[in-house]
Image (cartoon, helix red, strand yellow):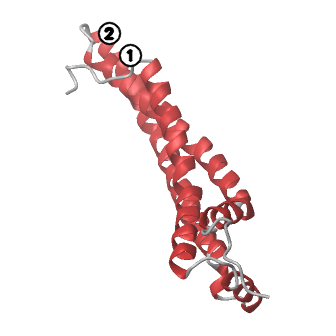
Amino acid sequence: MTAQTSTGKKSFMLSYFLYKLRKNKYYLILYFILSMMVIPLLTIYGTVCIGIMNSYADCSTMHEVENSGKVFQSLMESEPVFIVITGIAFIAAAILTIAVINSVFSYNVKKCDSDMYLSLPVSANQRFFADLGVTASICVVPMAVCGAVSLLFSSLFSVGADKAIT
């Protein structure tokens, strides 16, 4: 018997990438949840702040200035809440990123996983870049999607600073 050349697919990098993405799908879901809670909230807060600043800049009488000053003061009192929420979200995102990296590259520290992954028909470069792509997909795609949704939200309501502010 002689060995025959294989006519099948030569690179299993895409299959490996999709396998690792499926294996870490819960991290992707967590990132989407975190992104959907924080990014639109910050966009709404920014929209409210710009609206208040625009109304403050458009004041013509002293009565309007006093009313806008009260609203502006209440906005300044609620600012620490949004700062704390943003800080907690960034810390959670950093911890989740470390967990994702640990999960994706776990074959480097577990002997049983190392034996399985290193026996796959994927070169070391392909394995590394597939793992790097999975990590980037899990950490960046949810933030980009939620950022696009927030951008769409703010553009639908045509939020922008007046010339009086800038």
Q: Residue 105 carries which label?
A: none
What is the crowding at mark 1: few (fewer than 14 residues within 10 Å), some, or many (at least 20)?
few
Does 26 sit left or right of 139 as displayed?
right
x and y, in percent, of residue 149 in the image:
53, 33
The spot of residue 70 in percent (x, y) is 40, 23
Above/below status of 59 relative to 154? above
Percent position of residue 57, x then y: 26, 18
Residue projecting furthest to the right: 1
Callout 2–callout 1 Cβ contact below 8 Å:
yes
SS at mark 1? helix
| Secondary structure category for the residue under label 2 | helix
**Residue type at numbered disc 1:** Asn
Name the residue carrying label 2: 63
Quadrant hosting residue 145: top right
The residue positioned 30% from the left and 16% from the top of the image is: 65
Residue at horizontal 47 percent and vertical 48 percent from the top: 83
Residue 119 relative to residue 82: left or right: right
Q: How many marks?
A: 2
Task: Name which residue lies at 43% across and 27% down.
Answer: 47
Q: Name the residue under label 1.
A: 67
Coordinates of residue 140 in the picture (x, y in percent): 51, 54
Quadrant where the image shows the N terminus: bottom right
Q: Distance between the residues labelled 2 and 1?
A: 6 Å
